[in-house]
Amino acid sequence: MRKWKARCGGLFLLLLTAMGLAPALAQDAARGRALYSSTCSGCHSDPPGSGSVNPLVRTGDEIRAAINRVSPMRSLGATLSSTDLADIAAYFVTVLGPPANAPDFDVSGQWASATQPWWALYVTQYAGRSLLTGGWLTFDQQGNSIWLYFYEAGGWTGPGIYMAKLFRNTGPAFATPPGAGADAPKATEVGSVAFVFSDRNTADVTFTLDGIRVTHRIGRVANPM
């Protein structure tokens, strides 16, 4: 069982990486400040924070999305790399501060319950943004394995308290040939999840799934890779 869980954990982390959910690499806030001053401050306040920059923008992807939405800014998309935008985002964090209620430690990683060793919970926290994403590998009432996930439909509701909706996907089989007319994958809301983080290694999690509510004390576990 332990080997199976480790293998599943490694595969799941690889999947998160492929989906862009893995923790970002170290960012250079000082370089981001220089880039912001040279490319952005002509139209936006320097330092940011007086209303000219969306206070919720904290990641490179969010900055790129904002650039693409505003016609005069779209030319920047060709000149600023993903690394450039990540550094600018890091600078925003130093000016705008961390999101309210988020803990001052990163909760990313694999978490598990000592009383439920057959399932695993994976969490990624985006630096400088009040957002957690992750997945829960468990079993349904019939004993079938299921993968539930949570993403932007959530937020910090109190100090160390994070709540989000749980979703489950359905779609065509992995071996379905391209263009076979299969239905596109569909996300269905099936419940909710709530975390209360006591410290960087301990939390309580409450799942509500198909009307059933359970609470577990969980702890961070070593990276299975």
Image: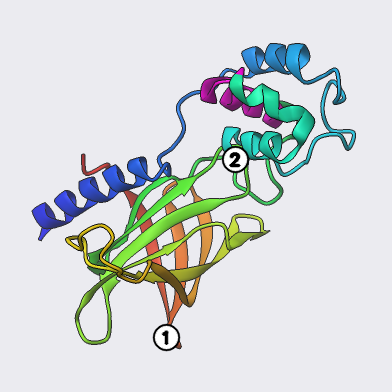
Which residue is rendered at x = 85% and y = 26% of the image? 44
Colour approach in the figure = rainbow
- Judge left or right: residue 225 versus residue 37: left
Q: Which mark is residue 104?
A: 2
The prevailing secondary structure element of the residues shown in magenta is helix
- Judge left or right: residue 44 versus residue 223: right
Q: In which quarter of the image is the N terminus?
A: bottom left
Which residue is rendered at x = 50% and y = 41% of the image? 106
Q: Badge 1 local density, few (<14 within 10 Å), some, or many (20+)?
A: few
Q: Can residue 69 be seen in this view?
A: yes
Rendering quarter of residue 205: bottom left
Q: Residue 210 carries which label?
A: 1
Q: Specify start and end residues of the magenta stretch as a single range.
A: 79-93
Q: Position of residue 208 (x, y in %)?
A: 46, 79
Is 187 drawn above or below residue 49 in the view shown?
below
Which residue is rendered at x = 53% and y = 21% of the image? 83
Q: Where is residue 16 in the image (x, y as percent from the top left)?
A: 35, 46
Q: Is residue 58 visible?
A: no
Q: Nearer the viewer, residue 129 or 189?
A: 189
Q: Which of 189 and 117 is in front in this view?
A: 189
Is 60 drawn above or below residue 18 in the view shown?
above
Is 221 drawn above or below residue 127 in the view shown?
below
Q: Position of residue 87 (x, y in %)?
A: 60, 22
Amino acid type at circle 2 is Asp
Which residue is rendered at x = 74% and y = 16% of the image? 39
